[in-house]
Image (spheres, grey):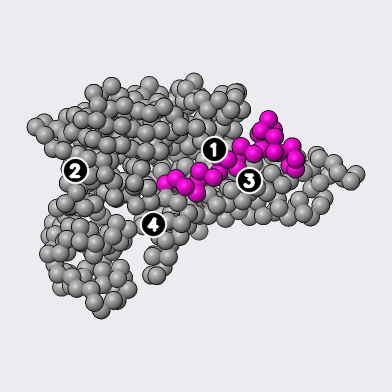
Amino acid sequence: MDFSWPAEYLAFKDKTIQFAQRELNEGTAERDENQSFPQSGWMKCADFGIQGLALPKACGGSLEEVDFLRALLAMEGLGYGCEDNGLPFALNAQMWTVQTPILHFGDEQQKKKYLLPMAKGNLIGSHALTEPAAGSDVFSMELKVDKVDDGYVLNGQKHLITLAPVCDVALVFANANPKLGRWGISAFLIDKGTPGFTTSAKKSKMGLRSVPIGDLLFEDCFIPEENLLGKVGMGFSILNHSLEYDRCCILASQLGAMERQLERVIDYAKKRQQFGQPIGNFQSVSNRIADMKLRLETSRLLLYKTAWLKKNGDNAMLEAALLKLQLSEAFITSSLDAIRNFGGRSYLTENGVEKDLRDAVGGVLYAGTSDIQRNIIAKLLGL
Amino acid sequence: MLEQKIINYILEELHGGQSDVEISPEDDLLGSGLVESMGMMRLIQFVEDDNGIKVAPQDMTIENFMTVAAMVAYIDRAKNNG
């Protein structure tokens, strides 16, 4: 057993942290307040090569092949360095649930059309699965697909879609043949400007406020055959293929955020004086910090193990569910501990402490709620 | 024999050995609800491990995994293709 990372991976992680701290943090509080999307940060990330981490050189990446563990560690570094937790979240969403499916299931034309512009930051892609009546019960989707000559006609709605209000292309899942159940689900690439396809305005939300979220609306929207990703009925496979990569990397960025949070709390506990001494001397404070460290490291172990299994092509269903449950819940609990240790000032938005808690709450809801993760774990344990 | 092995896995591992479940090689596993989506992923993992093959994501289609009979045919092809 060897827990060490290659030196080059660690050096690249450090470089990513420095890039994020230098280029991405100005105006974080204002973007949170105004719920404005960091367009310039998105482009800077593309210039640095973040979006390209999920792509081989031929499609805009920097390496001949995607190195998943190197990418994962870099996304952890991005989460540590970037104080806007929304930006790494949005980047991961595009990288692993839009770019990766196109890379693995797309034809040459689709790869050429979408992947290079995404790597360069010129194209933003959203992944559209959830519907008003299909949340955790995702396969009950109702977006209607009618087969016509040379393509399909879509009618209906996708709901709570990350990046929807700013997307240039949406990867939309719909059941083209409900008689086949889950085998009928297909994936369509739908370009902005396609007649009958509109996006809602961004919805106001609790956390990750720099990432616009909204609905996709389809009204007699004709999609030509060439915009089908993979074959008819391949949606189930496309969904399952990208799910664990996405989960690992989004959570890697959250792990980075948890580490930044912990360091900030430790620094404050050493400097803040009450009753004539640093508050870190009081066990009520230091015990909370010890618990934060424990949550961080147990989350890290689960993350790295899950990523290692995925890298080796092994089954990681159980580990991915354990990871998602552990890390997302841990971030909430640690964010509350951070607030308790900072005291009253953390309740003020201007000090930037409470933002982590607001951002963390989304983690127990998106990409499978904590309840769903527990169900998966229980099933895999034979219950 | 392979058919029965897959059916046994579904009955024992995915249905917890419930005696009232019956599966024939031609049953639509996902469509009929005999196997739910996570169960299908576990079943594919079992097929991989038991037969020493790797199912490419592009192969995870209705043609190859709708029924136990389709799975057996896919496994035979995968083994023959090396």
Q: Residue furthest left?
A: A149
Q: Nearer the viewer, mark 4 or mark 2?
A: 2
Find disc 4 in the rendering and name its residue.
Answer: A317
**What kind of element bears circle 1?**
loop
Magenta stretch bounds: A342-367
Tell which of A99 and A161 is nearer to you: A161
Instruction: State left or right for residue B3 relative to residue B48.
Output: left
Quick check: A190 above or below A187?
above
Instruction: State left or right for residue A335 relative to residue A318.
Output: right
Among the two numbered marks 3 and 2 on one chain, the one whose residue lies closer to the N terminus: 2
Q: The residue under label 1 is which amino acid type?
A: Met
Among the two numbered marks 4 and 2 on one chain, the one whose residue lies closer to the N terminus: 2
Find disc 3 in the rendering and name its residue.
Answer: A335
Q: The residue under label 3 is which amino acid type?
A: Ser
Q: What residue is shown at x 56% (from left), y 32% (from top)?
A: A84
**Local crowd size for mark 4, using a 10 Å CA cut-off: few (<14), some (14–19), many (≥20):** some
Q: Are marks 2 and 1 on the same chain?
A: yes
Among the two numbered marks 3 and 4 on one chain, the one whose residue lies closer to the N terminus: 4
Instruction: State left or right for residue A143 relative to residue A307.
Output: left
Q: Which mark is residue A206?
A: 1
Distance CA(mark 3)–CA(mark 2): 43 Å
Q: What residue is shown at x 15% (from left), y 73% (from top)?
A: B1
Q: Quadrant of the C terminus of chain A?
A: bottom left
Q: What residue is shown at x 70% (from left), y 50% (from top)?
A: A289
Q: Are marks 3 and 2 on the same chain?
A: yes
Residue A254 in sight here: yes
User: x, y percentage for residue A120?
Assistant: 39, 23
Q: The residue under label 2 is which amino acid type?
A: Ala
Q: What residue is shown at x 77% (from left), y 54% (from top)?
A: A284
Find disc 2 in the rendering and name its residue.
Answer: A176
Q: Nearer the viewer, mark 1 or mark 4?
A: 1
Q: Are marks 1 and 3 on the same chain?
A: yes
